[in-house]
Image: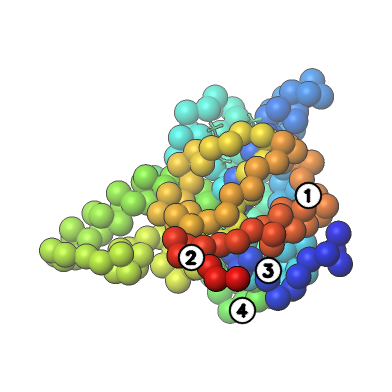
Amino acid sequence: MFENIDKEKLPKHVAIIMDGNGRWAKLRGLPRIYGHREGAKAVEKTIRIANNLGIEYLTVFAFSTENWQRPKEEVEAIMSLLVEYINTKVPKLIEENIKLKFMGRRDNLPDMILKTIEEGEEKTKHCDGMTFIVALNYSGKAEITDAVNKIISSGKKHITEKDFKNFLYLPDVPEPDLLIRTSGEQRISNFMLWQLAYTELYFTSTLWPDFDEEEFLKAIYDYQSRERRFGKVVSK
Ligand code: IPE
Ligand code: IPE
Ligand code: MG
């Protein structure tokens, strides 16, 4: 599979909706949190594969603003998994020159989470290899609404699409070229609504904890077979 990938045509930015942790656990008669734990291992592998391939930006959807509506125990378990994950993985990210970034609403995040996030960003800010973005307490509608409120506060009366982008959470990050969603669901679930305008979508029925190198390469290979037209006519 690896040899089939055209290194000249890699997506610059890959975004992933990591879905199916709960079903993975359920299939094994385990509590949902086991699925999240196994999902964290899949994230780890995915970072390595993306970095080795030469992907410049990797974004993963870890927790949506809607996910707070899940049972309290599940939310707490996901949050402590996140803190543990960031704290233990940051040294490895630094070693591999990977910059960690968070994308989401920061203002209503528990202090402990915010502190961990900001420390992770601070410690990796000098890294200039791949950028690894964790979407946390994120929703596309919230991001757009926050942008509009920032525009209102700035006193601007008129805005262009280019200006608008500057008010999003991570204005310097290029839009995703490829979006992967696992678990068989074929929806966006409020992810990066602005940025996905021309992104290639790839859906796989594999549950997130089972996502591996072969799956990732399959998605990249599929992406490379597509013709991105951006509304234009492509002459052959
Ligand atoms: C994705 O897996 C992880 C989060 C949304 C936090 P799910 O927990 O949504 O797993 P399913 O969809 O219930 O199987
Ligand atoms: C999307 O998955 C959010 C994350 C992967 C973090 P969900 O499991 O929350 O989405 P729905 O509810 O199936 O649309
Ligand atoms: Mg789900």
Q: At label 4, which amino acid type do we have?
A: Asp
Answer few, some or many: residues within 10 Å of disc 3's Cα (few below 14, many 20 plus, some between 14 and 19): some
Q: Which mark is residue 128?
A: 4
Answer few, some or many: residues within 10 Å of disc 1's Cα (few below 14, many 20 plus, some between 14 and 19): some
Q: At label 1, which amino acid type do we have?
A: Glu
Instruction: Please report the residue visible at 30 percent of the width from the left and 49 percent of the height from the top.
Output: 145
Mark 1 lies on a secondary structure that is helix
The image shows residue 85, relative to residue 64, as above or below, that is: below
In this figure, which colouring scheme has been used for the structure?
rainbow
Q: Earlier in the sequence, mark 4 or mark 1?
A: 4
What residue did someone put label 1 on?
215
Give the CA separation, mark 1 to mark 3: 15 Å
Q: Earlier in the sequence, mark 4 or mark 2?
A: 4
- Within the image, what quadrant is residue 101 found in? bottom right
> Is residue 79 something one can see in this rendering?
yes
Q: At label 3, which amino acid type do we have?
A: Leu
Q: At label 2, which amino acid type do we have?
A: Val
Residue 56 pos. (x, y %): 63, 70
Mark whose residue sits in front, 2 or 3 = 2
What residue did someone put label 2 on?
233
Answer few, some or many: residues within 10 Å of disc 2's Cα (few below 14, many 20 plus, some between 14 and 19): few
Cβ of mark 3 under 8 A from ligand 2 = no
Cβ of mark 4 under 8 A from ligand 2 = no
Mark 4 lies on a secondary structure that is loop
The image shows residue 58, relative to residue 30, as above or below, that is: below
